[in-house]
Each structure stands twice: as C-alpha cells, then as structure tokens.
Amino acid sequence: MQSSVTATSSRSGQSRSAGATTGRTVRHEPARGFSSAAPGSAHSRSAAISRTPSNETRTSNPTRSAPNGARSHVQPHQRNSRPAQVKNGRGGRVKQYIDPARFVSEAQKIEQEIYIPQNQFQDFKVQKRIIDNLLEKGYETPTPIQDQTIKLVLDGKDVVGIANTGTGKTAAFAVPLIHDLITHMENRLIVMAPTRELAQQIVEEMLSFSKGCNLKIALLIGGASMNLQQKALRAMPRIVVGTPGRIKDHIGQGTLNLATFNRVVLDEVDRMLDMGFIKDITSILSRVNPVRQSLFFRATMEDEIEKLIGRFARNPVTVSTRVGATVDSISQDVIWFGSAEDKLDKLHDILIDQQCSKVIIFDDTKRLVERLAKELLARGFKVDRIHGDKSQSQRSRAIKRLKTDEINILVATDVAARGLDVSDITHVINYSQPNTYDDYVHRIGRTGRAGKTGIALTFMQSNR
Ligand code: AMP
C-alpha cells in the first residue's frame, strides 16, 4: 500500500503533501505484529524478519528531488565543504558531521519470513502464574529472543543476548528469572539499565509478569527520592532495578549490599558503555556475589563490551536474533527548511496530517524543548515535554499521557531516546539534528518498534 501524506497548511489553508515537502512520497506499510507460526518447522531457529543489509551502506535514490530541485539529501553547498564537526550553535555539545544521505531511506520491503518458535510459553518449565500473567498481557507466542533465551536462563547459563531494541528482551530475561526467584528464596536479582525511563519500564514489566507472586522490586534511579529508595531497600526486595549512577550512590552510602545478589542483568549494555558508565558498571559487577548467573543484552558488538563480558561472564552462551539495523523498518527523510518560521510551519503541516498520530519530536536543549512545546500548545496541539530539568515524576507522567493518548506529541531532548518504549509511535521528528549518527539511530528507534514500520524525518537548514 502506498499513499502520500496530505496536510493542510496552517497559514495558507492549502493542501499539500509531506511527500512534496520532503521531495518524495512517504510509503506507509501496514503495521505488523509479532509473527508466529506453529512450532517445529525447519525455519524455527531463524530470525523473525529477514531484511536486506543495513541501510548504513546504502545511498538513497539519487533521482529524488528536494523542493529546490537539488537531490534531496545533498545540498550543493555541502558537496565540497564537509566539516568534520559542527557546533550546535548554542554552546552545547559539538555535533558530528553526518552526511544527510544517511537520514534518507525507504523502509525496506520486509520479506516476512515467518518465525516459527520452538516453544510456546506453556512449554517453558515456569510457574503457571507467570504464564497466566503473560497471556493476560496478550503475549501469546514467544518472540525469537524469548524463544531462544528463556530455556538457557532456566538452565542456569550465562547468556549474551544480541537483539534489536523492541524485540521483547525484557520478558526474555524477566520470565525465567522471576521463576528462579520464586523457586529459590535465597536468590536476588539486580538489573542495570542505561536510563531512568528504561529502568522504570523494566520494573513495570516485571511487576506485570510477577503479579500475584509476592516479589518486591526496588527501583533505584536518579531524580527520585533517596530516602524512599533506602526505605525500599530496607524491605529486602528480591529484585533491584536501576541506573548505574544511582546504584553506585546506594553502594557508597552503605544502603545496598550487592554481595547478597547472585543474579545480574545488564540491559542495553552497549548504551551504558556509550553513556560513559563503564567504570560504574565494572565497580558494581565486582561487588555482586561471585557465584552468580549473569545476562548481558545488547544490540551492537564492540570491543569494550567483549572485554566486559569476558571479565564478568562464565562461559556465556550467545543468542543472536539481530536482523540488520532497527532502522531498516523505518522510512527516513529530510525536511529542508529556510527560516525559523518556515521550519515551524513545515512542522505544523506534518503534525496535522492524520497519519501522524503519535509523535516524538527531538530538539537540542531543555530551553528549545520548552519553547517548541509551548509554541505547539499555543497552536492547539496536544503536547507534553520531557528533558533533564523535569523531575522523574513529571517525566513519567508525560510518557503515561502519551501512552494513554491524552497527548499525541512528546517533545524531548535525547534523554527520552534511549530505551523509551511507547507502542504505535508513527513518527520521530528530529527538529534538530542529532549529535551523532548513533544518537540518530537511537532517536528513530522509538518508532518502528515491535515489528511495526515507522517514519523518521530530520529537519535540515538549506542555508540558501
Ligand atoms: P521489549 O523489547 O522488552 O522492550 O519489548 C518491546 C515491546 O514488545 C513491548 O511493548 C512488549 O510489551 C512487547 N512484547 C514483548 N514480548 C512480546 C510477546 N511475546 N508478544 C507480544 N508482545 C510482546
């Protein structure tokens, strides 16, 4: 199915298409859920979706034209003057030069090779209560990472899981470990995640998987009360989930003794290393009980991660269900703008389009996020915002409002890009260019999740 995105201009009242704005038609593919088929076929160990190689090596269709008639991703002035880095102009972080071609890509025609799981949830030897909770949540069939990881974890193996974000990693570790904790009262689990939002989501997921199992969970994240967290720790929770910085704070204050924890999960370990947590993680891991089971989840492979795993895991089994970059399922394009006014009008036109039903807009700084959110509110859009100056409860509230459709636009700094799982995000809009390509991938990974396709649009100034 192919359709162009039609929007009504705020000022002119004329109809125009986002395809025209962006220099091409945006392709919409029907949303896909997790695919499944009966267990036992020859395809059963293959990945859920097969895609052509990552778009990182592809260039976009050179015949597409931008509004000014140039190729959509290459502005003439940029061809011979390629700066290595670009300041973001507000005294902020130095931006890496990213070739605009990397922001333009059709969502790949995904050949849906149906993944045939080896197991149904009922096949795993875990407490029935957990299975019932999964079914109640609508999890009927294990995703590939769940299908291939749960049994290994139940067998006590250390596991390195390599999977795209949004493919069900949380249940892959949480289901077997919740069973383990219910059946072994002496065991305790610590989960580390790169961001507060991800840590919070993990707690929410674990609470829903373990409903009725009487497991206490403590959430240790920055921006929330130390006192309340200390109180939660005094109640001897069986599970602690947190970000490395706050976990270290508690260790430093003597309120968390990791020697009593013998199960450890590092989620999005590549993100944690990117964010500079290597020292904290190393120091935390060396305090966890040495007789333990360790699980590491990541989407990419880097030397530093290998070293970390080599040092802290015990003969780990690697499970890889990663199929190309997550960005392959996302239609990506550039929106060229001239003046600041033109930029806002173009954004307005995109947002009033019916297809644009749930959006995250990224901007550079807290101040810019506040300003844009106010502007959009004044224009009658249903908007909230998150950034580093917002308290944790304000951030959580904004995400909840987005999840429950009270609002459909969230304006955010990069703080929201990592680990945030809101289903049905149709568009990610980079109102400012990300600092690095890696940041770009993480921003746009908020759409196209859980087997769905999405659209990512990046604003770039034409300088003409
Ligand atoms: P995760 O990678 O754990 O963040 O999961 C991504 C999304 O997929 C979340 O919204 C989950 O609730 C959902 N999900 C995970 N596993 C399943 C499953 N087996 N069936 C249906 N939805 C799932």
Image (cartoon, helix red, strand yellow):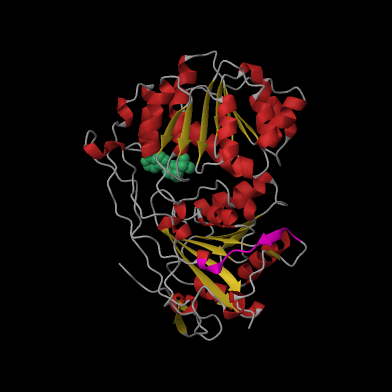
In this rendered view, identify the residue nearer to me: 61 or 380: 61
* Closer to the camera in the image, 385 or 430: 430
Q: Residue at x 63, y 54 (%)?
A: 414
Quarter where residue 383 is shown: bottom right
Quarter of the picture containing the C terminus is bottom right
Residue 321 in percent (x, y) is at 40, 40
Q: Nearer the viewer, residue 218 or 77?
A: 77
Residue 11 position, x and y percent, is: 56, 84
**Relative image position of residue 57 (x, y in whole percent):** 46, 59
Magenta span: 92-101
Is 96 one of the magenta-colored residues?
yes
**Looking at the image, in which quadrant does ligand 1 appear?**
top left
Question: Is residue 244 rendered to the left or right of residue 8?
Answer: right
- Screen quadrant of the N terminus: bottom left
Residue closest to the far front: 80
Q: Is residue 125 left or right of residue 403?
A: left
Residue 313 vs 40, above or below: the answer is above
Report x, y in % for residue 122. Answer: 31, 27
